[in-house]
Image (cartoon, helix red, strand yellow):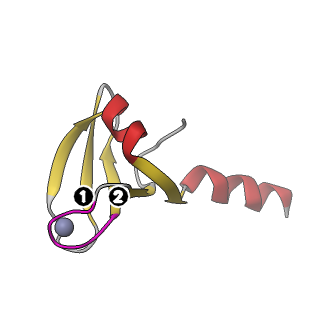
Amino acid sequence: MKLDIGDIVRLRKTHPCGNQDFKIMRTGMDFRIECLKCGHQTWITRIKLERNIKEIIYSGDKQKQMMEEN
Ligand SMILES: [Zn+2]
């Protein structure tokens, strides 16, 4: 799974604030993600994050590809 800074992902786990959408702030062995609703940031391992992702809502990479096709 390709994940980059700025991507928005929907997780299977719901944050205590009721939101499921998170923005990737840092990548690497551990990822830093920000809750889009309450702004809470947390560290999560790549493996844990990949297992938790239900859907990639927004990927900067995909948008770039689309722009190249058009
Ligand atoms: Zn939250």
> What residue would you read off at disc 1?
34
Q: Relative to 56, is 46 on the left or the right?
A: left
Give the residues in magenta.
Answer: 14-20
Position of residue 2 relative to residue 65, above or below, is: above
**Amino acid carrying mark 1 in the image:** Glu
Give the image location of residue 54, x and y in percent: 47, 53
Q: Quadrant of the N terminus?
A: top right
Q: Residues within 10 Å of mark 1 (few under 14, many from 20)?
A: some
Asked if residue 17 lies in the magenta stretch, the reply is yes
Asked if residue 30 lies in the magenta stretch, the reply is no
Position of residue 5 relative to residue 27, above or below, is: below
**Amino acid carrying mark 2 in the image:** Lys
Q: Relative to 61, is 51 on the left or the right?
A: left
- Dot 2 or dot 1, earlier in sequence: 2
- Which residue is located at x 31 percent, y 35 percent? 48
Tags 2 and 1 touching, CB below 8 Å? yes
Q: Which quadrant contains ligand 1?
A: bottom left
- Extreme top residue here? 29
> What residue would you read off at disc 2?
23
Element under label 2? strand
Element under label 1? strand
> Secondary structure of the magenta portion, mostly?
loop
Which residue is at the front of the view, 17 or 58? 17
